[in-house]
Amino acid sequence: MKESFFSLDYPAFWGIMLRFAINLVFLFFLIRVIYFRYSKKEKYLFTFFLMGITIFFICSLFRTVFMELSFAFGIFAVFAILRFRTSNFNMKDMAYIFTTIGVSVMNSLKLVKFPFLGILIINTIIVLSAFMLEEFQLKNKLDSHLIIYEDLELLKPDKKAKLLKDLSERTGKNIMKIKIRRINYKRNIARLEVFYYG
């Protein structure tokens, strides 16, 4: 009996739907819970979610793992090019784009010999890694602002400790790092960017 064009391979179809549900759950934690919490960039939520969903279904429709991986590498190459042609994305945004692609491709693969629990553990590791890295960066993030400084004598390398102490006393902040942006020898002033824990 000839198979209908509209017939579905129900075990394969529901397997894709199950993997899609898993993918959607972990994308939600990665993008909405972690990325949005630390970046507050609501404009990228639509892009990240739609990208993850679309990549998942495209990869799920391929019949061989080889084709799926080839497509994944192609997507990575495309976004590597976009990184240098687009100024709207910073490095952290690009990291989340690559992670969204990687998670979606990984969850789309039908790995018969790989246990279902293994996929959940790997997804959990990726999401927890993003969370811990965000927390680490938040705790070690330095705020900065520009100041005009008039004592050029303290800008000499051998007087760094005195300069840090003087700036800390003047600003009331625990200055950790200093960058000299500009020196005006005629006016005897310098523009400094000072870094401190907020």
Image (cartoon, rainbow, N blue to C red):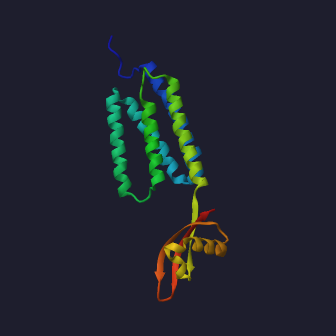
Q: Nearer the viewer, residue 114 or 157?
A: 157
* Residue sitting farthest toward the front: 158
Q: Quadrant of residue 110?
A: top left
- Left or right: residue 88 compared with residue 27: left
**Residue 9 in picture, x, y percent from top left:** 41, 19
Q: Residue at x 39, y 57 (%)?
A: 86
Q: How many marks?
A: 0
Q: In this view, does 67 lie above or below 94?
A: above
Q: Which residue is drawn at 53% across and 30% down?
A: 121
Which quarter of the image is occupied by the N terminus? top left
* Residue sitting farthest toward the bottom: 186
Q: In this view, does 67 lie above or below 192?
A: above
Q: Residue at x 49, y 31 (%)?
A: 20
**Residue 99 in picture, x, y percent from top left:** 46, 42
Which quarter of the image is occupied by the C terminus? bottom right
Q: In this view, does 142 lie above or below 129?
A: below
Q: Residue at x 57, y 58 (%)?
A: 141
**Residue 67 in picture, x, y percent from top left:** 32, 31
Q: Nearer the viewer, residue 92 or 8?
A: 92
Q: Nearer the viewer, residue 143 or 1?
A: 143
- Left or right: residue 112 compared with residue 175: left
**Residue 189 in picture, x, y percent from top left:** 52, 83
Q: In which quarter of the image is residue 148?
A: bottom right
